[in-house]
Amino acid sequence: MKKLLLITITFLLTAGSVRAEYPLGVSLGMVKVPEPEKLAQIKAAGIDHVEVVFNYFWRNAPENECYTRAYRVKALLEEAGLKVWSCHLPFSRQLDISVPDPALREQNVALMERMIRLASIFGPQRLVLHPSSEPIADEEREIRLQNSANSIGRLALSAKEIGAVLCIENLPRTCLGRDSGELMRLIADYPEVMVCFDSNHLLKEEHAHFFEAVGNRIGTIHASDYDRKDERHWLPGEGVIDWPDFLRCLQASGYKGVFMHEVRAGVNATPENVVKAYKEVILGKMKK
């Protein structure tokens, strides 16, 4: 009888864990400019966590304005009652930590180190980093993988200095890290470095296989939907991803972080619709 009761309890706990809810988050890329009204909408929708996108401080402003902008955003987030889970380090076609030219690579990695110091004012638990830009020719791929891995090791030390975990994002098309094999190779020598799993960047591999290959190295996620032809950053449910299965795999990986959405495409990309999609599409709590 006791054995039967134990089996029943175990089954119920396991079944319940499939529908366990994560804290919700959204990338500030959704709002473009983090104005008070837009941040208030995020909070009012029932979202407590955000990812701060550093292109707002770097790409669209002189570097000597980075800190003033960052402190301004920090104050706005605190006023809105929003917590920073992660910071997305800047990215562009030119800002690439894998480039063959040593001088340019040093320049790019040094800039990333400065951006990591800047991130310290937000107190993030995770830092998201692109392992390369694109296009990358096949004949350059091997040296670029080595360059990127070396740069990641250096930046992992900077992340550790501010108490954050560096997470390398899987990327689409010809970028480095376009499948689990490449991504795990990039972080193989650094057990403290983890993965940012972007659900709409996976073009060469099934989601379930990626989860299986990466295992417990997932440190954060970027959730959005797509058509498997290219990245789209749609709301969950607008594309082809099997979200209940995605959730089961995420749970099985042991992930304990924020369910971070990186949705920025389409007229439906609002905080309210992110929450609705999470409840109805991902958790399966259909509105009655």
Image (cartoon, rainbow, N blue to C red):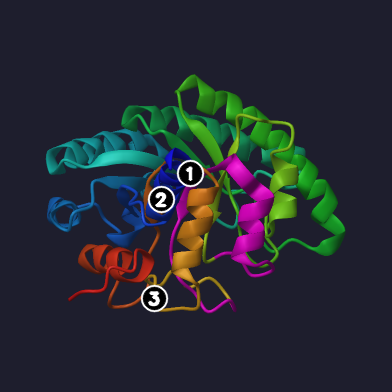
Near mark 3 (Cα within 10 A), the count class, few <14, some 14-19 or many ≥20, is some
Quadrant of the rendered structure where residue 107 is? top right
Q: Between marks 2 and 1, how big is the CA–CA gap?
A: 12 Å
Near mark 2 (Cα within 10 A), the count class, few <14, some 14-19 or many ≥20, is some
From this view, report whether residue 131 is shown above or below residue 139: above
Q: Residue at x 16, y 40 (%)?
A: 81
Residue that numbered label 3 is attached to: 237
State which region is magenta.
Answer: 201-229
Q: Secondary structure at mark 3?
A: loop
Residue that numbered label 2 is attached to: 17
Work out whether residue 238 can be spotted. Answer: yes
From this view, report whether residue 154 is shown above or below residue 128: above
Q: Residue at x 69, y 51 (%)?
A: 213
Question: Is 203 included in the stretch rendered in magenta?
Answer: yes
Q: Residue at x 69, y 54 (%)?
A: 180
The amino acid type of the residue labelled 3 equals Gly
Judged by depth in the image, the label closer to the viewer, 2 or 1, is 2
Residue that numbered label 1 is attached to: 255
Which of the pair 186/281 is nearer the observer?
Answer: 281
The amino acid type of the residue labelled 1 equals Tyr
Q: Between marks 2 and 3, how big is the CA–CA gap?
A: 22 Å
Which of the pair 205/163 is nearer the observer?
Answer: 205
Q: Residue at x 26, y 39 (%)?
A: 83
Q: Between marks 1 and 3, how big is the CA–CA gap?
A: 22 Å
Image x and y of residue 198, in percent? 52, 58
Indicate which disc, 1 or 3, sits on the residue closer to the N terminus. Answer: 3
Image x and y of residue 113, in percent? 54, 30
Dividing the image into 4 quarters, which one contains the N terminus?
Answer: top left
Question: Is 220 included in the stretch rendered in magenta?
Answer: yes
